[in-house]
Amino acid sequence: MRRAIAIPLLVGLLGAARIASAVDRTEVVFFGAEYGLGWVNLKAVEYDGLLPSVVEKSGSGSTLGVHAFARLFVLALGVRAQVIQLDDFDVWHMNVEGQLRLPSEILEFYVKNGLGYAFLGTDFQGEDPSINGWDGQAGFGIDFYLKDWISLGPMFDVTFLNLTRSGSLTEIDATYGQEGSAVGVGIHFCGVLTLHI
């Protein structure tokens, strides 16, 4: 079974590498910035009574991000930092990300998966309870090459969040004086400007 899966995967990677060689994509590193829209939905479990309660929070806002990658043929490995700016809080992602890139003459399609650290930027009545955890991200995008060294294109990804919150030490707000946890999902749709070296 493993061999049946591994052989087609290897053939696909070799074929993609041959395409990359044919279009003379010789970059070693690439880095850039992104801007667009994001949406987040969080379901938080509060432990402030006899039984836990669930509080749902969602919102949308602008998304900013930066990335830097090293590349070997059709594979790329790097880091990406993103933030969704909502009305009540910001959602930050700092991930290690792998990409499979399939080039052609003027555009390049890629799929990506990332895993890393996530946290909320908050400020509740002067308190700043620590709300952080991990996230997993999957998505895809297209780079349109304006020149050999610069590209512009869309990117879409979905992020799964698993966060915890420590209680406020001074407990000036009873809601945030208790520990809690949250799970959620985020969606990003961005325009990405990338420089290729």
Image: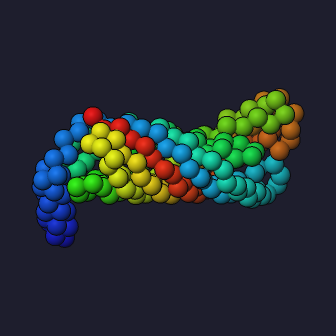
Residue beneath the point at 43% across and 43% down: 193
Residue 189: give x, y in percent of width and height. 53, 55
Left-right relation of 38 to 25: right
Which part of the image, by quadrant, shows the C terminus?
Answer: top left
| Of 45 and 120, the residue lying toward us | 120
| Of residues 163 and 190, the one drawn nearer to the viewer in this rendering | 190
> As drawn, is 46 to the left or to the right of 138?
right
Where residue 176 sits: x, y (%)? 79, 41
Could you tell me which residue is drawn at 63 percent across and 55 percent down?
Answer: 40
Residue 30: x and y, percent?
Answer: 33, 38
Residue 56: in sight, yes or no?
A: yes
Which quadrant of the structure image shows residue 91? top right
Left or right of residue 21: residue 150 = right
User: Which residue ends up furthest to the front in the rendered image?
Assistant: 146
- Horizontal side of 112 relative to 120 (left or right) equals left
For the point 23% across and 57% down, the residue is 104
Looking at the image, which is closer to me, 170 or 154? 154
How many numbered marks does the figure carry?
A: 0
Residue 164 visible at all: no
Residue ID at (76%, 35%): 123
Look at the image and tell me in which quarter the N terminus lies: bottom left
Above/below status of 54 relative to 173: below
